[in-house]
Image: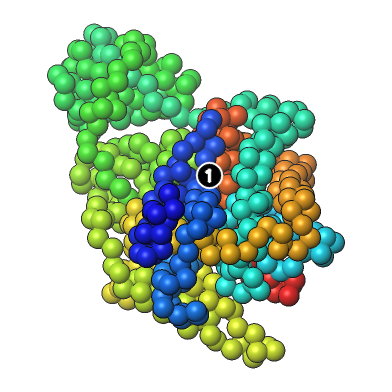
Amino acid sequence: MQSFIAFLNEVPLAGLMLVVALGYTLGHQSIRGISLGPAGGTLAVALLVGFLGLSFRDMYGSEDPHLTLGTLGFALFIYSVGLEAGPRFFSSLLGGAGWKMAAVCLTVNGVAVTIAIACGLLFGLDDSVTAGVLSGALTSAPTYAAAAEVCSNQQTLTLSFALTYPFGLVGMVLMVVFLPHAMRDDLSTDSGEIGDAADDEYSDDLEVTRAFSVDKVGSAGKSLRELELTRRTGCYIITILRDGEIVIPSADTCLQAGDHLQAKGRIDELLKLQPLIGPEIHDREFRRRLPPQRRVRVLNRGGIAKSLAELDLTGRHRVLVTSIDRGGIIHEPSADFVIQRADILHVAGPRREVRHVARELGQFESPTGETDIAIYAGGIVLGMLIANIDFGLFGIRLGYASGLLFAGVLLGRFRRIGRISTHVPRQARQLVRDLGILLFIAETGVRSTESRLSDIDGGIPLTLFAGVLTTAVPVVAGIYLARRCLKMKPTDSWGAVGGAMTSSAALVAIRRAADSNEPALSYTATYAVASVLVTLAGHLVVRVMS
């Protein structure tokens, strides 16, 4: 082992890449849905190999190099956080219950920062340890990266981050498991629902899809125009499976005996359809053999903050929305699903009608995986310029983390600036974001082993206790606000708090407890805002404690 470590010290770039590879792999191993994540896995590996003797001292040939791979990773990561949050940051705050999500997010993050600072002052923790406590309690790599830019000691920041990260990860999941029972909230049925009537506008009118076989003598041989099924029942015929081929019907389409129809409507409407058409059947061929889907990104105001029922794409264009991609999380469509800016609708139907939908709502999501590197390079330059602006108030500058974050949010908010497209495929954004933070954590993690745990001001027990408080108290405060003050549903409340804590492990636990994907809607709404707030919080905590 020592000879291998000696080889890595002679070729430090190989050592850095090994830490990234092993850390990324470890971070994706899960136990009952709980995983360290790429950042947590890389931090664990970096600390381990650092204690075994790996060092990057000779990597740059200078004691204080101006540019390192970790610095590059930092810039790519923080800018990517802003770029990813940009399209949804403003839409998450507007319309409907957006203000409730914003209130939960601000409360959770505000309480977390307050508790971390209070523990730091009470327990005698310095700025680096306090920022590490906040980063670990929120399991937030953006907080850690932002704090690392301005803290007094990156090594104790990393060690305190590593100490508090495990409870931030597992503690949030445990609270999801046990706290709803203590509050008598049943996430699986939302039995604790006490929300406003406006929030339940479509609760009794959810639309579903069902399949029917045409065997009624009065329906075979007649067109849909003649049958007037929509007028008589209220539901729509979406697709027809005929002789193994999918047919997208029009008003002049004639039904044939043996056709399998897919209809969409409320349960009571579908019950009216069965006597007119024939018996309900279970046919999986419909989903498997639907026409090729196109991805439509919602950008136009006419489609934003409206439910699928209000848009009525099926009735007006004879197209089917099969799923919705919001921030990388796939949602099943329902009548009350409210569309937000930058949502991607998976639309199937006649080519002409799908093109009409794309023009109406925004534009087609480009199938190409090509990424404009200039958006990253130019955006980082813009972020550096913003960071160095002197705002004239006591000579305050934002710092590189805040400048890069704001540049990413601004460029991510707009699809185009003049003739320049700011679009970056989601897979490319994720790759750059992950690679950036892994390079940064791998380098800082290994370097942090030059310090000892005993170097942490306040000691290990107080640091751990501060981390527990900084995880638990914001969750309780957020849930109390959402349930008791804002009267939100249990699934919405827990999804919003999970997003505000930027905890993907919490989302897995909440989904499992609710036995549905419904909490993902509120999770994505608050996550977009929280990803910006927790980045700024890293700077704020260090400034206050310095």
| Dot 1: element | loop
The answer to whether 510 appears left or right of 482 in the picture is left
Q: Which residue is mark 1?
A: 36
Q: Position of residue 528 (x, y in %)?
A: 53, 56
Rendering quarter of residue 426? bottom left
Q: Quadrant of the C terminus?
A: bottom right
370 relative to 44, above or below: below
Residue at the (77%, 32%) spot, across then down: 183
Q: Position of residue 340 (x, y in %)?
A: 47, 52
Residue farthest along the front direction in this orientation: 3
Rendering quarter of residue 196? top right
Residue farthest along the right direction in this orientation: 122
Q: Position of residue 10 (x, y in %)?
A: 37, 65
Residue at the (44%, 53%) spot, across then down: 2
382 relative to 395, above or below: above
Kind of residue at badge 1:
Leu
Number of numbered discs: 1
297 relative to 72, above or below: above
